[in-house]
Amino acid sequence: MIAEDMQPLSIVENRGFRKLINLLDSRYKLPSRKLIGTTLIPNLYESTRKMIETILSYTKYVSLTSDIWTSLNTVSFITVNVHFFDIDFNLKIYVLTTRKLDNSHTAQYLSEVLTDIIREWKIETKVAAIMTDSGANIKAAIKLLKIEHIPCAAHKLNNAVKNALKSEFEENYIDTNQTEEIEMMKLVKMCRSIVGHFKHSEVSTRILHEKQKQLNSPVLKLKQDIAIHWNSTLIMMERLLLVKEPLMLVSMGLPRCPDMPSNEQWQTINDFVILLKPFESLTIQLSSEQQPTLSKVIPLIRGLLLSVNNKNPATFTGKFLKKKLLEQTTKRFENIEDLYPSQFYAKATLLDPRFKKAAFTLNDNANDAEQEVQKEIADYIETNAPERTVLEPNVHQTPEQLQHGSQSISLQENLLTYLETTVTTLWSQTTYTSTAMTLFKQYMNIEFLNIHDDPILFWKNNKQMLGALCEIALKYFCTCHICIIGKSIFQSRSNNQCQT
């Protein structure tokens, strides 16, 4: 319970907890805090570690996600998660380590830390890719490891929206030639000022709640945003729209109440919410723990751009924000369908039976991904194929045959060996390639999966028929967007909280 719920060891010393345990079973004696810290927790750690090591030993491919973060007392750590499928096609996610970083975060140092972690868990030959943010140092570190790096789409999307909103920029850095940009920043500042006033005034908040009750409206608190988290700005504006009527009525009678938005500014706030909602929806989908998400990035980004492009803001400031959002998103994801910088997005999408080639904007990109997948299937078949028997000279010859002429026999043996080597090479190349093409054609001929169906269940049901292609698919499906930027910001949305 202490480990799973992240409770302090001192919980066993708490009077209320001790009363509860005694009520459940008066015969039970609680372990001491010292026993838990020195024996029980270390034993649990070792047993859990051995269990994970055993599971990892049976898997062929794993992917890693990693993030560097700083604690409240400014100590740096690196956390590494592992993602893979077990023998029953269940997606497993474990935190392998959270390790303190003692030196400067150079690429060389980070590569050494990651190498040590990978060796410690004996997965050197199994890591298909590592997903991180787009920090130059961590990207360079993974390049030194000669492992595929996947830039986190949720992190790129977060930066795109923040730059469009300029939520981390001071007013001094605003382009004064862009009137809409100034208006956008002023409006965000006005919303923060309104929320700040009610957050710091018990009287104003109480009057606002009373007015909501009089209007038979839900009693809702205002939400303050955090500049570095764009989604908190969305939550703040959504809440202001919900309490607009009681808020406007209350503001007229409150002393020192900040100015309220004009009708046009309220329209602009509504434009902001309409334009930002698709970005929030996409980020939440990318942060799912239960399903693989890599194959959904290309279709989701394409759907996001189409959705935003179809929005019709009512104000000039809203139109400006729409333009900036489209520019920033396109800039960061314009090469998402290409095989580079990361081939994983294109291959994962192609191997998702819900999408296949239909999700690609350009058919050439889909065809390139198909060729690369077929090569990978052929390589996999060749690597895992049983050795083909090479013809051997006939050793069961009679003495008369042996006396017939050793030179003739020798010549015949050399000729057959040469031909066997040549034929074996041509046979291998033709067989492995044609088998790969046949498998892929079989996969493409199967009808599309429903968009809401589970692609992993498809591969589980078709493992026997598609063989090597199934193994390749699992390699690309075991990568998920479970990272700090995706989870911590959005996981508490249902609780109406903004996590820092």
Image (cartoon, rainbow, N blue to C red):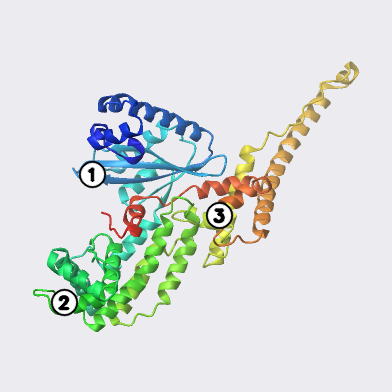
Task: Please tell me which residue lies in front, 331 or 182.
Answer: 182
Q: Quadrant of residue 415?
A: top right
The mark lying in front, picked from 1 and 2, is 2
Q: Earlier in the sequence, mark 3 or mark 1?
A: 1
From the image, tell me which residue sits under label 1: 71
As measured in the structure, the alpha-carbon distance from the residue carrying label 1 to the one carrying label 2 is 40 Å
Left or right position of 412 against 216? right
Q: Residue at x 90, y 18 (%)?
A: 400
Chain-order first, disc 1 or disc 2:
1
Q: Residue furthest left?
A: 255
> Furthest-top residue in view?
399
Q: Is residue 52 left or right of residue 197?
A: right
Tell me the CA gap for discs 3 and 1: 37 Å
Pointer 2 residue: 251
- Could you tell me residue 30's position as x and y percent? 30, 27
In the figure, 260 relative to 499: above or below?
below
Q: Mark 3 — residue?
A: 454
In the rendered image, the vertical position of residue 421 relative to residue 176, given as above or below: above
Q: Quadrant of the N terminus?
A: top left
Badge 2: residue crowd in 10 Å (few <14, some 14–19, many ≥20): some
> Disc 2 to disc 3, how far (Cα)?
51 Å
Q: Position of residue 396 (x, y in %)?
A: 84, 20
